[in-house]
Amino acid sequence: MTGPKGPGSGYAVGGRLVLTSAHVTGPTGGRVQVFHPGGDGSAGGTVVWAGKPGGRDDAALVLVDGSPHWRPPAAPILWGRPDTKRPGTPCETWGVPDEAQRPGRPVETAHLHGEVNPGSGFVGNQYVMDLRTPAAGWPGDGTSPWSGLSGAAVFCDRYLTGVVASDRQHFDHGRLNVIPSYVLHHDPAFRTTLADHGGGPQAALEAVEFQDLADPTTRPAARPVPVTPASLLEAGRQTVPFHGRKDLVAQLEAWCGQGGFGAWLLHGPGGQGKTRVAHHLSQLLTAQGWTVLWPRASARHDQLLEVRRAAKPLLVVLDYAETRPDQLTALVEAASEHPGTSSFKLLLLARTAGDWWQQAATSTRQAEDHLTTARTNLLTPLEDKRDRRASHYLGAARALATALQAVPGLADHGWTTALQPPRHLGENDAYGNVLTLHMTALADLLDTARTEPVDNTGGEEDVRDVEDRLLGHEARYWQGSAAARGLTPGLGMDTLRAALAAAPTSPVPSTVNAPMPCGGVCLRSRTSPATAATRSPPGSPPSTPPPRHGTVHHGAPCNPTASPNATPAAPSTPTRTSPTAFSTEPTTLRPNNS
């Protein structure tokens, strides 16, 4: 194939897929040769998607033939875009421009760095990369030192932000025209081709300015292969397809569509599905061009203030909001300084809407202005319709069985074993909690891995891992809650463990509305309900009462919907839910002249 500008550059974006320039490859179906700079040999490739050469979408995707000379990327690719109007966003690119080549030597690379200013190229849907080291001394013969760089990926730190298109005229080779990632992802055919050929899920574009604020565990594309069965239950993995909550999701979408600032508190016991609802809403909004930010727990006040610069519709999801009062204060301050030219929505996820929420909404004048009118919703059990629990259990089991094949060491097991729903599924309200239902299905599947009754080390250990992971999750939540209330470091982990152990059975004053661990549904017991309910924390004598009863009450869980004098009760049947204490290298494309 003959391209209009000869050799070009490219970048491996997943599997055998390479991103490059359409004016290098030509139309869909064309053939090119691909090689790694410094590597041995080359491989053929076929153009499987192409934009218009010289147009706004001057880019292409090439599927490389099976070849021993091909090295796929080692990690998923993250896609991004500048989301503020702040100038000077640092960026970089690798490729094989003519400027780097020397006669008689192997093809050499050039690593260029510069910056992107969002206002440059705005009308033409382009980015303009201002190079910090322009090519000096290039002869004025009408050629460009950057010929051969077309198709190179442009990164803003970790995010692939665009594709080099051409040398920008009239700037003495000091600027490059770049095709933005958002232009490519706007084309459904591009997204489908990317997903179909190993380029990862159709992930959202992240805000490059907020990348140090974002919790990396909330990015589907960045999630590693699950290393344990328990990790399949993480809400961010969305292993089991989302269902239900149609009215709530519709209300949230309508709220986001109203424009301006808005805050919404979604609260309910752990495992009820708050985080999953937020992930589903995030997907719907990113498909409409929104930016969604889940701040990491370690984000500082001054870092969070940067979201005030957001120039595109923004949804900030603050999970465990009751344990992050300082971050909530910073986000409210950022909202007060936001110009209001685009939507700014704050979705808070918490287990209760108690005293912490009253304090947060009145902590500052800005909080009073922005939070006192916030909407609040108690998330009720998803599986409250008992006649539907069996079908939902089986659906979860099928999805989990498929996902278990990706867990190291579990691929060889036949996870298609037909499961029977638990006998008491329709009788025990514990199964109204969606996490409990999914955990039960996963533990039941893992039980099928134990082929010999005398050998209970395989599946049994995996089941314990599921429970231990969830208990660890609860421990982290309690530690965060204690820190938010100013009880640490004075309140040690032994006391927190004592509170966690006592939680399912301890009477709690009605003024305390902290949540029952795991939504009032605890974990699989290998003892009788009575023994499990009175078990002491590890390292404590069985008869020793929890220390500092007053502080235990401060965080002790109870059912927020129970009557004032009610005492949490254990399930009547000893089931699984009985209570217990608990770098990619740059790739170069060359036209195939054969």
Image (cartoon, rainbow, N blue to C red):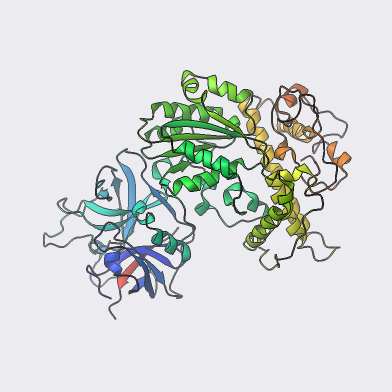
Q: Position of residue 471 (x, y in %)?
A: 71, 42
Asked whether the viewer can see residue 198, the reply is: no
Q: Position of residue 425 (x, y in %)?
A: 78, 49
In the image, residue 28 sits, relative to residue 179, either above or below, namely: below
Q: Is residue 318 left or right of residue 530?
A: left
Name the residue located 42 percent from the left edge and 59 percent from the top edge: 191
For the C terminus, give its image quadrant: bottom left
- Residue at the farthest bottom position: 594
Say which of 342 and 75 sits in front. Answer: 342
Name the residue located 26 percent from the left edge and 42 percent from the top edge: 119
Asked whether the viewer can see residue 381, the reply is: yes
Q: Position of residue 46 (x, y in %)?
A: 37, 73
Q: Is residue 571 left or right of residue 273?
A: right
For the N terminus, give its image quadrant: bottom left
Name the residue located 51 percent from the left edge and 30 percent from the top edge: 327
In the image, residue 6 sits, relative to residue 471, either above or below, namely: below
Say which of 202 and 390 sits in front. Answer: 390
- Asked where in the image residue 111 lies, by quadrant, the reply is bottom left
In the image, residue 185 sits, relative to residue 569, either above or below, namely: below
- The total number of labels drawn is 0
Q: Is residue 268 left or right of residue 573?
A: left
Q: Position of residue 358 (x, y in %)?
A: 59, 22
